[in-house]
Amino acid sequence: MTAGGGTKWAALPPQLSEEELASFWGGLPPVVAVTGATGFVGRHLAESVRRLGRRPRVLVRDPARLAPTVADGAEVVVGDLGDDAALLALVRNCQLVVHLAGVVRAARARQFEATNAEGTARLVAAVRAAAPSARVIYVSSLSAAGPSVRPAGRHPDEAPAPISAYGRSKLAGEAAVRALAGPWAILRPPAIYGPHEVDMFQFFRLAARGVVPLPRGERWVTVAHVSDVVRAILAAADGRVDRRTLHLGEPEPRPMEVLVAELARAGGVVARPLPLPEGVFRLAGVVGNAMHAMGFRQVAITVDKARELCARHWSAETASSLAALGFAGAVPFAVGAAHTWAWYRQAGWLPHGKMRRERTER
């Protein structure tokens, strides 16, 4: 059973080759302003910008957190989204601004609002003042659109209905970007996975241990490999999708149980989904909030995240967006997951000794 219409999509590689990157060269100005360059997607994007021979101008609180592959050749502006002077320095005379920075996990709605909504509004104000003709690419989230009532997924033109404080704050950020008189594009990725990622990594770690707890009930999901998100940003840089909101990710959603099975096969492990009552995850979210209050900011599940985890369905209609970007397909999850397993193992995040090989006779 599939949720899509049976269109044949190409399988894109999980790494951008020099030849593919070269196809984006003409759309990139000499300097690209980037927020969130110390984060997961920001690191991958800034590395690609460097590989293209362009210079990323990055806004960071702590330059020491920049990956060496980004720091070498980057122009660093020290500050954050609450620093108006730093924002002006970041965007001044830039033709392209990519906004990736944001708060993903927090125990209070106010923390999301301060960065994702008000911080984005400050960045927009800086663009108006110092780079009024700049193109702004805002990497939002499928959480801003909300879950879909259909397995096939929510269309980017549907009215948004976020169910979490995080989603509402990202939607407010979108509103600030849409108010710009100049060119902009809003990209809404679903759950993103790939090398260096720490949230989806939890599913890999659970699969390595043999059991992946999931909320009971049918839930279809769309996922995106980080390379496809970078591809979308680079493609949007040339103006082909100006003043549009797009959904990113694979064109065919899948049930969570199928995703877990594909994840296990890609890693050569035996793992099974463990359906649990939603209350278990909601209780874990309450505990997570308490942990955040005590200073443990890296705890993955909070009340807000538990609310999202229990929703149905986190799937997106991406075919129209892929076509608008000029893409023939996406990174298949089986390929992208295998690539990600290999990176986690090589980096020592998932030691080989803890893996259980999948039986071949089944």
Image (spheres, helix red, strand yellow):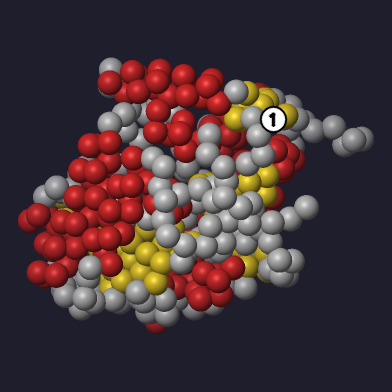
Q: Is residue 55 visible?
A: no
For label 1, the SS is strand
As displayed, is residue 283 above or below residue 96? above
Give the residue type at disc 1: Pro
Residue 252 on image: x %, y %:
66, 58
Residue 106 on image: x %, y %:
32, 33
As displayed, is residue 36 above or below residue 245? above
Q: Residue at x 57, y 42 (%)?
A: 312
As displayed, is residue 109 above or below residue 21? above
Quarter of the view holding residue 273: top right
Q: Residue at x 56, y 64 (%)?
A: 318
In the shown orientation, is residue 305 left or right of residue 279?
A: left
Quarter of the view holding residue 285: top left
Residue tagged 1: 273
Viewer-nearest residue: 230 or 222? 222
- The number of callouts visible is 1
Quarter of the view holding residue 139: bottom left
Q: Is residue 280 visible?
A: yes
In the shown orientation, is residue 86 left or right of residue 30?
A: left
Residue 207 on image: x %, y %:
65, 31
In the shown orientation, is residue 215 left or right of residue 113?
A: right
Residue 300 on image: x %, y %:
43, 30
- Kindly give the residue lying farthest to the right in the view shown: 361
As displayed, is residue 8 above or below residue 224? below
Q: Residues within 10 Å of mark 1 (few under 14, many from 20)?
A: many
In the shown orientation, is residue 159 left or right of residue 115?
A: right
